């Protein structure tokens, strides 16, 4: 029995960080030809080089993670601010700009952005990180409606409280800090990385063709106001 992504080439950026490992595993199980890439995408030419090397790309997973400076707005330097956009926003545009022409030509393609729920709910001392994540989601909405007429679907997850090596590694799970944060999560637990990757799999498949420029909160109800 063939997998759901049999014959599809999938490019995953920052493949060893954030949701890269889980998505790589699940997509490989489903028969995808996975290009798990780890190059430094802050270099202006890197995104185009990646797309050129990969060739035909059916699915692009824009998995971009940055280290949150967690500073008060009055202490957030220009360097802190710029770094968040250099790591998570500028590479996103370059990746999509590079891959979109071939998807438009074939009239088929999926782009999924691994975003953050920090863009949907205010968090003190997260201004630079949240602003960059918010820019990602606004970009997805704009590009999503632009690409839809060409049968290319661009969507994003706004996720939080998901096991992953960048933000919720095992050594953080049992800390008092996380236990306190979990009190605000209605689901009362972290999502597994595999749960997250399986939702990404749905967005990468044919069943999601009618989703356009959507931002899907994936945070156990954290964004729902009580």
Image (tube, grey):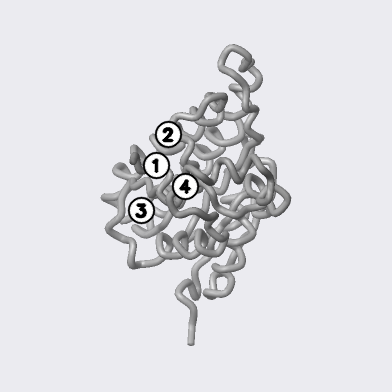
Q: Is residue 104 left or right of residue 62?
A: left
User: Which structural element holds mark 1?
Assistant: loop
Quarter of the image for the C terminus: give it.
top left
User: Which structural element holds mark 3?
Assistant: strand
Residue reaching furthest to the right: 171
For this rendering, which residue is in front, 2 or 73?
A: 73
- Position above or below: 200 against 144: below
Residue 185 percent coordinates (x, y): 47, 47
Residue holding disc 4:
185
Q: Which mark is residue 153?
A: 3
Q: Nearer the viewer, mark 4 or mark 1?
A: 4
CA gap, disc 1 and disc 2? 7 Å
CA gap, disc 4 and disc 2? 13 Å
Residue holding disc 2:
121
Residue 71 percent coordinates (x, y): 62, 22
Residue 204 percent coordinates (x, y): 43, 62
User: Which structural element holds mark 2?
Assistant: loop
* Disc 2 crowd, CA 10 A, few/some/many (<14, 14-19, 20+): few
For marks 3 and 2, the one nearer the N-term is: 2
- Position above or below: 224 against 153: above
For marks 4 and 1, the one nearer the N-term is: 4
Please report the residue visible at 30 percent of the width from the left and 54 percent of the height from the top. Answer: 211
Occupied quadrant, residue 87: top right
Q: Which mark is residue 223?
A: 1
């Amino acid at each position: 029995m063939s997998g759901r992504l049999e014959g599809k080439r999938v490019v995953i950026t920052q493949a060893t960080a954030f949701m890269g490992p889980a998505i790589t595993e699940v997509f490989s199980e489903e028969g995808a030809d996975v290009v798990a890439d780890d190059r430094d995408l802050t270099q202006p030419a890197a995104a185009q080089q990646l797309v050129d090397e990969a060739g035909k790309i059916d699915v692009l997973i824009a998995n971009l993670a940055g280290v949150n400076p967690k500073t008060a707005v009055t202490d957030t330097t220009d360097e802190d601010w710029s770094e968040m956009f250099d790591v998570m926003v500028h590479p996103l545009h370059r990746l999509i700009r590079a891959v979109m022409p071939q998807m438009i030509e074939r009239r088929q393609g999926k782009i999924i952005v691994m975003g953050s729920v920090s863009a949907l709910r205010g968090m003190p001392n997260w201004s630079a990180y949240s602003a960059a994540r918010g820019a990602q989601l606004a970009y997805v909405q704009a590009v999503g409606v632009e690409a839809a007429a060409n049968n290319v679907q661009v969507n994003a997850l706004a996720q939080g409280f998901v096991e992953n090596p960048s933000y919720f590694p095992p050594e953080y799970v049992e800390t008092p800090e996380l236990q306190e944060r979990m009190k605000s999560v209605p689901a009362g637990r972290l999502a597994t990385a595999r749960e997250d990757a399986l939702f990404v799999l749905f967005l990468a498949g044919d069943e999601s063709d009618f989703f356009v420029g959507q931002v899907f909160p994936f945070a156990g109800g954290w964004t729902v106001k009580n």
